[in-house]
Amino acid sequence: MTAQAGARVEDLLRQLAPQVLGTLVRRYGRFDLAEDAVQEALLAAALQWPEQGVPENPRGWLITVASRRLTDELRSDQARRRREETAAAQLPIDELLAPGPADELPQQEDDTLALLFLCAHPALTPASQLALTLRAVGGLTTAEIARAFLVPEATIAQRISRAKQSIKESGIPFSLPPDPERAERLRVVLHVLYLIFNEGYTATSGPDLQRSELTAEAIRLTREVRRLLPEDGEVAGLLALMLLTDARRPARARADGSLVPLAEQDRRLWKRPCIDEGVALVTEALTDKPLGPYQLQAAIAAVHGEAAPAEDTDWPQIVALYELLERVSPNPMVTLNHAVAVAMVQGPEAALERLSTLDDDARVATHHRLDAVRAHLLEMAGDRAAARAGYLAAARSTTSLPERRYLEGRAALLRDDEP
């Protein structure tokens, strides 16, 4: 097996995983058992296909193998007792156990979307939503998810297990939610994808600044939602935001892994195709779609992306967009970023005054970003001692090693510059 063949098979399996799982859940109505069966089928394919070749109908192969695993489990005594307890909600036993050829199990266009809605159901905890989405829809293994979030594999396995148990006990249906619920449920789905991307773009802890496998997976899944919901402006906005942000990734770190802030990045390294696609997406979304927070964030990212040198950035336009974003979706992180933009237009004193409104906000009062932004503004204002103290306070709070090193470096520069 060549590494190239293995990589091709891995990409194909990741693409097929939610389709196969959606088909089985739609037919058998048992997410917990179906997910286990699909994982076994994926493992079998990962072992066999690189050596024996990819079958002519890979999706049908996976459905057939997973269906056999699932029907074997359903025939067991333990599964029979579980079925009897919920007999009223299950299909007739003869129909349930009939495996049927793969071509009798056509994929429905909304299977993947229904699966995303299921994994991001509000009944699950945010941590379980992330883990289950990456496992069931993203096709990542438990070990891959654990490595991405720097937690023990057993912890991720427990989160996934709890999520599947919650789905089983609550009787959440495998279907698209009714129209009155769909907008709110879609908001949760997009938030889960946004969190996956953010964790990949700036890891919350550990030695690495970013994890490209998570950003790539978030973009892939958002593209899939966009394919299924092409008219939704916020889906387009989120995809645009991810592309415009990920475009900067090659310039965000030096060869030694140290962080490079936006203003100092070599913009020739930015991925121009991602910027062009992101700008086109957000331009279309802002033209004829209801306005939402992801569209506005993408518009801000587009202004940065279109500024070849940093000094060409249209900061007044960014300030105006942040003012609109704070009205549409007020939150402390928006206020933090708004303050930085205000400093570029009105000066650091005006920005510091705006930042003071967050001192009593429990959501951010102890977050390292508040200390870091305040230190940056104090440095702009010429108060080196207070800025240095702020950088050191932020460094003590962050669990990201690249961010800590950057903040400590800023503090050291201020100390060295003191007369």
Image (cartoon, grey):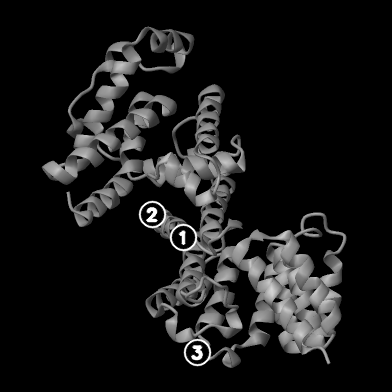
C-alpha span from label 1 to label 3: 24 Å
Residue 206 sits in quarter = bottom right
Q: Percent position (x, y) of residue 164? A: 50, 29
C-alpha span from label 1 to label 2: 14 Å
Mark with earlier residue (1, 2): 1
Q: Percent position (x, y) of residue 61? A: 19, 35
Q: Tell me the amino acid under the disc marked 3.
A: Ala
Front residue (pair 358, 297): 358
Front residue (pair 298, 360): 360
Report the residue at 17% width, 28% height from top: 101
The label shown at residue 224 is 2
Residue 142 sits in quarter = top left
Mark with earlier residue (1, 3): 1
Q: Percent position (x, y) of residue 218? A: 45, 56
How many neighbours does mark 3 have within 10 angstroms: few (below 14), some (14-19), or many (20 or more)? few
Q: Tell me the amino acid under the disc marked 1.
A: Thr
How many neighbours does mark 1 have within 10 angstroms: few (below 14), some (14-19), or many (20 or more)? many
Q: Tell me the amino acid under the disc marked 2.
A: Glu
Mark with earlier residue (2, 3): 2
Residue identified by numbered label 3 = 308
The kind of secondary structure element at disc 3 is loop
The kind of secondary structure element at disc 2 is helix
Residue 328 sits in quarter = bottom right
C-alpha span from label 2 to label 3: 31 Å
Quadrant in the picture for the C terminus: bottom right
The kind of secondary structure element at disc 1 is helix
